[in-house]
C-alpha cells in the first residue's frame, strides 16, 4: 500500500521552479491553488497566465482513486483504451457496495458473497493493470486516501465527488467521471477550466461544541449548493492552522456540497503531524524542504480581496454549531434556533437515528469526540433515545478506536458498529420499516441529505451535523435539543447537562492495524485474466457508441422536462441500483426515475408520444429507441449536481437521448455528457424553458457548423402546428466537439492507441 515516494519527489523536484515561473507569468504573488495548478501543467513550465473561469487547461494529475461503484465503469472503459498498464499510480476502494443492516460482523461477509463477481472483477482488473486494490472492509475511499496517499501540493482526480476530501492534506483533489479517470490512467492530459478562487479566512479557534464540520455547514449556508461552482475554495488564516488535518479534510469534503471544484488548505504543522502519525515521515521530510511553496504567498493572505474572486471571513471563536437540512445541505440552522425552525416548518422533532461516519467525519478524532459524549451519557445515567449507528472510516481507524475503547463506549450505548464503508451515506442501509415511508427525522455526520439518500424513504428528514452533535442529539432523541444550554433527564429523574466534547487529534499510542485490507498489483499483469462473465447481470463489457451522423438532429421527442432539483441521484439513483454500476443496460432502467415531470409533478411518469400513454421514463425512452427516434431531456438550474457518476451521462446516451438542455449544469455532469458524445446545452434565455411543451417535437440546428462559442438553434414544433425557435448555448471547445463527432472521447483514445 506504500505511497509512491519517488513520484512525490519528482513532483517536488519541479515544484519550486514552476511556482517561480508562474509568479513571473502571472505577475503577482500566488495563492496555494494557483501554485498547485501551475505546478501540474501538462506542458511543464508555465509560459502563460490563464484566465480564471474561462481558459481550458491541460493538467497532469499525480494520482487516480476510484471507488467500487464508479471503478467498474471507469475500468470497463479503461479496458477499451488499449493500454497495458495505468500511466499514474491508481487505486480502487471497495466501500460503496456494502449494505448496513446488522453490523459489520454479519454485513461484511454478506456483501462479499452478494457482490463477489464485482469484487473479483475489480481485484483482477486492478491486478492486471497495476492498480492498488483495497478490499471490502478496508475503509471509505477518501479516508484511506488521506491516510495513505494524499500529499501536500499534489494533484489527484478520483471517480467520486468527495475526492476533494484530500484538500485536508493540502492537495488539489477533484472528483471526475470514470471517463476522465480513464484518460489519465491511459496517460492522457486531463482538461479543466481554470477555476475561479474563493478565499475563506478563518480567524480564532474552534472551541466548546463547535467542530470543523460547523465551518463548512456555515459556508454552505452562505454560498448555497451552487455558490462554489467552478471555483476552488482556499482556506487560510490562524483558524486554519489551528485545526487538525482530518478536520480540514471534513471541510474540504463538503466543498462538494457547495458545488466547488475542490477546496484546499496550505501545508502546516497539523499536516506534518498527520503524515508522521500515518507512517509517512519521508513525505513530511520532503514537504518540509519546499514548505514555503506549499502554501499561499504571505501577500495573498494579508490582502485576500486583491487575489481571490470572493472572500469570506469566519471567526471560529464565535462560530455556533449548525444543523443543516432537511433535504439540502445548504439549509443551515444554528443549533440554538433549531427547535423554533423545526416547529415552524413541521420538521419532526423526534429523532429516530443518529449516524456517525461517512468519508466526511469518520476519523479517529471524530470518533474520539463523539465517544466523549457517549461516555458522559453513560456516566450520567442517560439512555439513548434514538438508535445509533457508527461507520468507522477505515480499518486502521476502526482497529485503533477499538483498541482505545471508543467502539465499546458506543456499544454500551447500544450503537450498531457498521462496516468501515459508506453504508447509509449512499443509501446502502437496510433500515427496518423504511418501506412504510413514514415521516421521521434522522441526524447524521454525512455530507448529503437529499430526499431518499440514506434509506430510500422520501419522508425521512435528514439533518447534517458534527459527529459530537449527532451523538448529543441522538442521545436526547430530540432535534430541538441544544446541548449548550439544555438539560436531559437521567435514569434517576435528575436534570443533567452534557459537557462539551473532548477528543484526540491523533491517537496518543499511535495508529495500529493488523490487516489494512490492501492488495498490491501483480508485477507483471500481462498474464492476468480479467473476470467478467458473459451472463452476468452486474457486469457487461462495453460496445463503442456510434459516431455523430453528420447532420442536424431533427424530430426529437421530449422525454422529460424536469422540474426543480435534478441531481445525479435523480438521474441515476443509487441505493439498490448500485449493484448494476458495471452493467450499462441494466442500470439504464433507473434513468431519470427520480426527476419530477414538469407537466404532472410526478416522478417516473412521462407521456409516451408514440402511444399517448403515461409510463416510466426508461421504458418510454426504450420505445423511442426501438422506433429509431432520438429524444431530448430538458432541465432546470444546476442540473446534474451531486456526484461524479458518469452513468448519469452514459444511460441517456445508451438509450438514445441525443441532448440535454438545461438552465445551468453542474460542472462534472456537463463534462461527463461531453465525454460520452452527448450534447449538453444551456438556454441562452432561461425563460425559454417555459416555451417547451409536453407534445413538442424538437430540432437542433447548426451542428454541421458546430464550433466553440457559436450558439446552436433549437426549433420547437408544437402540437398545434406552430413553431418557435431560439438560440441555445454550449461550452464545447474544439477537442470536445471532436468527442461529440466521434461519438465519445473513448473512441478517439482507442483509435490513437491502435495507430
Ligand atoms: Fe461514501 Fe458517502 Fe463518502 S457514499 S465516499 S461516504 S459521500
Image (cartoon, grey):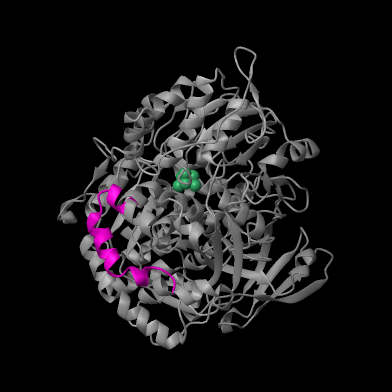
Looking at the image, residue 165 sits to the left or right of residue 288; the answer is: right
Q: Residue at x 45, y 59 (%)?
A: 177
Nearer to us in this view, 624 or 267: 267
Which residue of the protein is positioned furthest toward the top in this rendering?
A: 492
Image location of residue 374, percent across then percent down = 50, 27
Q: Which residue is drawn at 35% across and 62% down?
A: 152
Question: Is 296 covered by the magenta stretch?
Answer: yes
Q: Residue at x 36, y 75 (%)?
A: 39
**Which residues make up the magenta segment?**
274-297
Q: How many marks overall? A: 0
In this picture, is 500 found above or below 171? above
Quarter of the figure with residue 683 = bottom right
**Magenta segment, prevailing SS (helix, strand or loop):** helix
Nearer to us in this view, 493 or 553: 493
Q: Where does the C terminus fall, quadrant-wise? A: bottom left
Nearer to us in this view, 229 or 238: 238
In this picture, is 35 found above or below 385? below
Q: Can residue 540 be seen in this view?
A: no
Looking at the image, residue 670 sits to the left or right of residue 277; the answer is: right
In this picture, is 596 found above or below 83? above
Looking at the image, residue 754 sits to the left or right of residue 466; the answer is: left
Nearer to us in this view, 418 or 369: 369
Quarter of the figure with residue 555 = bottom right
Looking at the image, residue 323 sits to the left or right of residue 304; the answer is: right
Q: Is residue 253 visible?
A: yes
Question: Is 673 covered by the magenta stretch?
Answer: no
Amino acid at each position: 500500500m506504500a505511497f509512491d515516494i519517488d513520484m512525490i519527489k519528482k513532483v517536488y523536484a519541479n515544484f519550486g521552479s514552476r511556482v517561480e515561473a508562474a509568479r513571473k507569468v502571472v505577475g503577482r504573488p500566488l495563492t496555494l491553488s494557483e501554485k498547485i495548478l501551475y505546478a501540474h501543467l501538462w506542458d511543464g513550465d508555465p509560459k502563460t497566465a490563464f484566465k480564471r473561469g474561462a481558459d481550458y487547461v491541460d493538467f497532469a494529475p499525480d494520482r487516480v482513486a476510484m471507488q467500487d461503484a464508479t471503478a467498474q465503469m471507469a475500468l470497463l472503459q479503461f479496458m477499451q483504451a488499449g493500454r497495458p498498464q495505468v500511466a499514474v499510480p491508481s487505486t480502487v476502494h471497495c466501500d460503496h457496495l456494502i449494505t448496513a443492516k446488522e453490523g459489520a460482523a454479519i454485513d461484511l461477509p454478506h456483501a462479499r458473497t452478494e457482490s463477489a463477481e464485482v469484487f473479483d472483477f475489480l481485484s483482477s482488473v486492478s491486478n492486471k493493470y497495476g492498480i492498488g486494490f483495497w478490499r471490502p472492509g478496508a475503509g471509505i475511499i477518501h479516508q484511506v486516501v488521506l491516510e495513505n496517499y494524499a500529499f501536500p501540493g499534489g494533484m489527484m482526480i478520483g471517480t467520486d465527488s468527495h475526492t476533494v476530501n484530500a484538500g485536508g492534506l493540502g492537495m488539489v483533489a477533484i472528483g471526475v467521471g470514470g471517463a476522465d479517470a480513464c484518460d489519465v490512467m491511459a496517460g492522457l492530459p486531463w482538461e479543466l477550466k481554470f477555476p475561479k478562487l474563493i478565499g475563506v479566512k478563518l480567524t480564532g479557534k474552534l472551541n466548546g461544541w463547535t467542530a470543523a464540520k460547523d465551518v463548512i455547514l456555515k459556508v454552505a449556508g452562505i454560498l448555497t449548493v451552487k455558490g462554489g461552482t467552478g471555483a476552488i475554495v482556499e482556506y487560510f488564516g490562524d483558524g486554519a492552522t489551528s485545526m487538525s488535518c482530518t478536520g480540514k479534510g471534513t471541510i474540504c469534503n463538503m466543498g462538494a456540497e457547495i458545488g466547488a471544484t475542490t477546496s484546499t488548505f496550505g501545508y502546516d504543522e497539523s499536516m506534518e503531524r498527520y503524515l508522521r502519525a500515518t507512517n509517512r515521515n519521508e513525505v513530511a521530510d520532503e514537504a518540509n524542504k519546499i514548505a514555503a511553496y506549499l502554501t499561499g504567498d504571505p501577500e495573498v493572505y494579508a490582502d485576500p480581496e486583491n487575489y481571490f474572486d470572493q472572500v469570506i471571513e469566519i471567526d471560529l471563536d464565535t462560530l455556533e454549531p449548525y444543523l443543516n437540512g432537511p433535504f439540502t445541505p445548504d439549509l443551515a440552522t444554528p443549533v440554538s434556533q433549531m427547535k423554533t425552525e423545526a416547529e415552524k416548518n413541521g420538521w419532526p422533532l423526534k429523532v429516530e437515528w443518529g449516524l456517525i461516519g461517512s468519508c466526511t467525519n469518520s476519523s479517529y478524532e471524530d470518533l474520539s469526540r463523539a465517544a466523549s459524549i457517549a461516555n458522559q451519557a453513560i456516566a450520567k445515567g442517560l439512555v439513548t433515545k434514538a438508535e445509533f449507528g457508527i461507520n468507522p472510516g477505515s480499518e486502521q481507524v476502526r482497529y485503533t478506536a477499538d483498541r482505545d475503547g471508543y467502539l465499546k463506549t458506543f456499544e454500551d450505548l447500544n450503537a450498531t458498529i457498521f462496516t468501515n464503508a459508506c453504508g447509509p451515506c449512499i443509501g446502502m442501509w437496510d433500515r427496518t420499516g423504511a418501506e412504510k415511508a413514514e415521516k421521521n427525522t434522522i441526524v447524521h455526520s454525512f455530507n448529503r441529505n437529499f430526499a431518499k439518500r440514506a434509506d430510500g424513504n422520501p419522508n425521512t428528514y435528514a439533518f447534517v451535523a458534527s459527529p459530537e452533535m449527532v451523538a448529543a442529539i441522538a442521545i436526547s432523541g430530540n432535534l430541538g435539543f441544544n446541548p449548550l444550554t439544555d438539560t436531559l433527564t437521567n435514569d434517576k429523574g435528575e436534570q443533567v447537562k452534557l459537557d462539551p466534547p473532548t477528543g484526540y487529534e491523533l491517537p496518543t499510542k499511535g495508529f495500529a492495524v493488523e490487516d489494512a485490507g490492501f492488495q498490491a498489483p501483480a508485477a507483471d499483469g500481462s498474464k492476468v485474466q480479467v473476470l467478467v462473465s458473459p451472463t452476468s447481470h452486474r457486469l457487461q463489457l462495453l460496445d463503442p457508441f456510434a459516431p455523430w451522423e453528420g447532420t442536424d438532429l431533427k424530430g426529437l421527442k421530449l422525454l422529460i422536462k424536469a422540474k426543480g432539483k435534478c441531481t445525479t441521484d435523480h438521474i441515476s439513483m443509487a441505493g439498490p441500483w448500485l449493484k448494476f454500476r458495471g452493467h450499462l443496460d441494466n442500470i439504464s432502467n433507473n434513468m431519470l426515475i427520480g426527476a419530477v415531470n414538469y407537466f404532472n409533478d410526478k416522478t417516473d411518469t412521462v407521456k409516451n408520444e408514440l402511444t399517448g400513454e403515461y409510463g416510466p421514463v426508461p421504458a418510454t425512452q426504450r420505445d423511442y429507441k426501438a422506433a429509431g427516434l432520438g429524444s431530448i431531456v430538458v432541465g432546470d438550474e444546476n442540473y446534474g449536481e451531486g456526484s461524479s457518476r458518469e452513468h448519469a451521462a452514459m444511460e441517456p446516451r445508451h438509450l438514445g437521448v441525443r441532448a440535454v438542455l438545461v438552465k445551468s449544469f453542474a460542472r462534472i455532469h456537463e463534462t461527463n455528457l461531453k465525454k460520452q458524445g452527448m450534447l449538453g446545452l444551456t438556454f441562452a434565455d432561461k425563460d425559454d424553458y417555459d416555451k417547451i411543451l409536453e407534445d413538442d417535437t424538437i430540432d437542433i440546428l447548426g451542428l454541421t457548423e458546430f464550433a466553440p462559442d457559436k450558439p446552436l438553434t433549437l426549433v420547437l414544433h408544437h402540437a398545434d402546428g406552430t413553431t418557435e425557435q431560439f438560440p441555445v448555448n454550449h461550452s464545447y471547445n474544439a477537442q470536445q466537439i471532436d468527442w461529440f463527432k466521434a461519438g465519445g472521447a473513448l473512441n478517439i483514445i482507442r483509435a490513437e492507441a491502435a495507430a
